[in-house]
Image (tube, grey):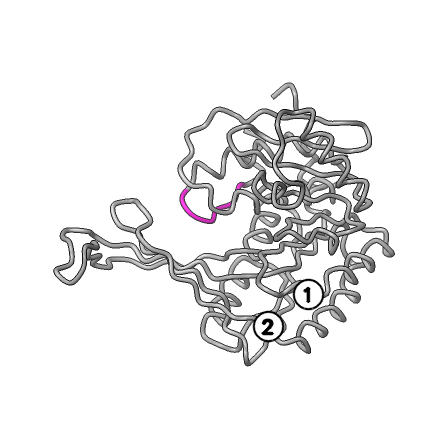
Amino acid sequence: MSQRAPLPSAERLAGSRVLVVGDVMLDRYWYGAVDRISPEAPVPVVRITGEEDRLGGAANVAVNVQSLGALATLLTVVGDDAPATQLEALLHERGIQTVLRRDPGLKTIVKLRVIGRSQQLLRIDFENTPDHEVLHQMSTSFESLVRAHDVVVFSDYGKGGLAHIPQMIAAARQAGRPVLVDPKGSDYARYAGASVLTPNRAELALVTGPWRGEAQLASLAQDLRQRLHLAALLLTRSEEGMTLFDAAGSQHVPAEAKEVFDVTGAGDTVIATLAALVGAGMPLAQAVPWANHAASLVVGKFGTASVSAQELAA
């Protein structure tokens, strides 16, 4: 605890306004009992005994921001279907301000997970790509929202909802707002000018190629940071913790010893914690150890989950 700067007060966090933009999804869980193997194929038969819907993707980032006591506004595109209505209802329950652009041709992303004996047995994804016109409307909404917020988070799950991200990053920087990006894919040029990117090891290796040792990693990370005109790059490293690369060099925060139950959504928690704290006035380098601590708490929970300011402080 001595390594972490004091958390901002509840009042400061309540004044932190975070605009979250990106791909949302409905995380649907079917829980059941597994008593036998199917006679039709060598697979377990799951007798469903319970169902649960949770907010996923960028919506989970917004939930994590709000759980910390900050104000989250979510801007996204969904379909005109029953999962979109359920997403909207869950967001309303959470009190998250939401600007939903609906695309009648889009299937709202649903990730259906079948759980038996406390294990994920199967995941089924429902999705397609949003319409260009709806994405243009989203960009227009972004420009009207950005100045009313302190910090912007782009949560890219590679589902097509951030086709216009270069223009939105430019608009946010013109407004003087820090921009945090959870990236996807191998084309990081589209994130040029962001304040910080938060890739994991596999995501960064897709862009830089593999590395051998810390010195080569630092060289590759700093080269990428300078080429893309980023203020910082935060590499999340699972059981190795996380490393921040910025103009001052590198700062490594080791992982906190914790039994890992489920890593689903841990990246959402990291970027949400950074955004809430930066929006409350904390320097990024001081926010990183808190984001690392938040991740250690959330992997001890099942499925997409969040961390409260009280849990973080405790």
Residue 290 x, y percent position in the rendering: 63, 32
Residue at image point 69% right, 24% down: 215
Query: Can you say which quadrant of the picture contains the N terminus?
Result: top right
Q: Are marks 2 and 1 in contact (CB under 8 Å)?
A: yes
- Identify the amino acid type marked 1: Ala
The reply, left or right, for residue 118 in relation to residue 105 is left
Query: Can you say which quadrant of the picture contains the C terminus?
Result: top right
Which region shows up in magenta? 302-307
Q: Which residue is identified by label 2?
A: 130
Q: SS for tag 1?
A: loop
Report the disc number at residue 100: none
The reply, left or right, for residue 176 in relation to residue 301 is right
Dot placed on the residue nearer the N-terminal end, 2 or 1: 2
Residue at image point 70% right, 70% down: 138
The reply, left or right, for residue 265 in relation to residue 236 is left
Q: Main secondary structure of the magenta part?
A: loop
Q: Which residue is identified by label 1?
A: 163
* Pointer 2 local density, CA inside 10 Å: few below 14, some 14–19, many at least 20: many
